Amino acid sequence: MFIGEYSYTIDEKGRIALPVKFRRKLADGIVVTRGLDSCLFAYSLDEWKKIANQLGSLPATQKNARAYARLMLAGAMDLVPDKQGRIVLPGYLREYAGLKNNVTIAGIVSRIEIWDTDKWNEYRKNTESASDEIAEKLSELGV
């Protein structure tokens, strides 16, 4: 399970370190892809297989299903952390998420999100200020 919020920097080669507590689960590989809200989603290989199978089974006849599958699958890159627990994020993924220097890595149970720190702080601030409304909507879903 991935939880927590961590701050890192991207070096000149596009490398970021993964949080120490995540490294063992990701030692064999990690899949990073375009996410939602201008961040990147990252999955363990086992979790990615589940996600890819779900996306691959979406109906190709539905425009939104095709678009979402393309966003997630075509943008995916499988990476293996180096001995220091770093991964090199491809330029197209860094550009998509607007990653320049400071990044925030957020553990979201089955995935990791990689954010530009300024975007993360703005997103978090907006979400925190709307937390009562969000909680009410989730209660309607049984959460």
Image (spheres, rainbow, N blue to C red):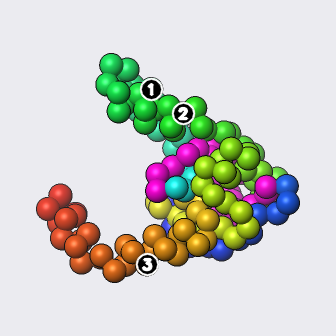
Q: Amino acid at mark 2?
A: Leu
- Judge whether residue 20 can be spotted in this image: no
Few, some or many C-alpha atoms within 10 Å of disc 1 (few <14, some 14-19, many ≥20)? some
Please tell me the numbered disc located at residue 73: 2
Q: Residue at x 58, y 63 (%)?
A: 115
Q: Amino acid at mark 1?
A: Gly
Q: In this rendering, would 71 be left or right of 92?
A: left
User: Residue 65's spot in the image, x, y percent?
Assistant: 36, 31
The magenta segment:
14-37
Badges 2 and 1: C-beta atoms under 8 Å apart? yes
Q: Residue at x 75, y 53 (%)?
A: 87
Q: Is residue 127 above or below residue 16?
A: below
Q: CA distance from mark 3 to mark 1?
A: 35 Å
- Name which of mark 3 and mark 2 comes first in the sequence: 2
Q: Is residue 98 above or below residue 44?
A: below
Instruction: Pick the residue in front: 58 or 50.
Output: 58
- Name which of mark 2 and mark 1 comes first in the sequence: 1
> Which element type, helix, strand or loop, lies under badge 3?
helix
Specify the quadrant of the image occupied by residue 106. Answer: bottom right
Please tell me the numbered disc located at residue 112: none
**Residue 21 shown in magenta:** yes
Q: Amino acid at mark 3?
A: Lys
Please tell me the numbered disc located at residue 56: 1
Q: Which residue is mark 3?
A: 125
Instruction: Pick the residue in front: 118 or 65.
Output: 118
Q: Residue at x 43, y 78 (%)?
A: 125
Of tags 3 and 2, the one toward the viewer is 3
